[in-house]
Image (cartoon, rainbow, N blue to C red):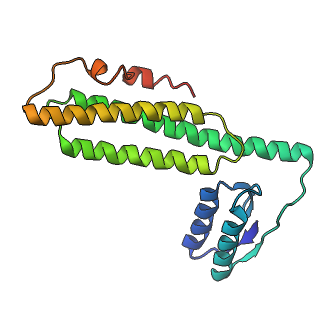
Amino acid sequence: MIYTLPSQPSRKRAYVWRELKRLGALYLRDGVAVLPRQGDLEARLVEVVARIEEFEGEVDLIVSPTFSEARATLLVLRFRQEREAEYREVYRACARFLRDVLEEVDADEFGFPDVDKLESELGRLKRWRSQISARDYFGAGGADKVEEILEKCERAFERFAADASERDERGGADPDDVFERLGGVSGAEDAENLPI
């Protein structure tokens, strides 16, 4: 897709940029984005084209352009690198989530407002992972590591919610070891040594 938009208002340019990034487009230069020809991407691009025209911009949608083998290989590599960077971001956010769970467990008092907050954050992490997976067209590295740490987050949250319920019923703190109660979830120092 090759497009130009009026410089003002800038929200129109930002909208198109966000939509293309949401699809996982790779920018070759300003106003030139490329996507693989997969699934419903062409139909979704047609919607972006209509929006650009609505915004009084100019746009050309070139379906199945020809690239040299070396250039195509480089583009696939760049797609993978962008998704790998996104997987690293969500991995780090998951590590922070685990630290947050540990901090809540260490707190003298925690209850259902804390459970709600952590449940909301866990849902956000899962949606983020799903969005990245949906635009991971070439099987970038890091997806497995994210899946593993999300499973740890899920288990830690389930333990935390169960502990919050028990603590609420008993009205006191549980003296058990934090790491044991969370199933051996790594502490903050381990979260700093991310494998990806």
The quadrant of the image that shows the C terminus is top right
**Which of the 4 image quarters holds residue 152?**
top left
Residue 140 in the figure: left or right of residue 183: right
State the image coordinates of residue 116 (x, y, percent, origin top left): 26, 47
State the image coordinates of residue 137 (x, y, percent, origin top left): 70, 48
State the image coordinates of residue 34 (x, y, percent, origin top left): 75, 58
Residue 157 in the figure: left or right of residue 1: left
Q: Is residue 39 above or below residue 151?
A: below
Which residue: 15% across, 24% down?
174
Residue 150 in the figure: left or right of residue 65: left
Q: Is residue 30 above or below residue 183?
A: below
Residue 73 visible in the current orientation = yes
**Which of the 4 image quarters holds residue 181?**
top left
Which residue: 23% across, 29% down?
105
Which residue: 8% across, 31% down?
170
**Which of the 4 image quarters holds residue 35?**
bottom right
Which residue: 65% across, 34% down?
141
Farthest residue, direction left: 171
Residue 100 visible in the current orientation = no
The quadrant of the image that shows the N terminus is bottom right
How many marks overall? 0
State the image coordinates of residue 122 (x, y, percent, origin top left): 38, 43
Q: Is residue 55 above or below residue 11?
A: below
State the residue in front, 28 or 185.
185
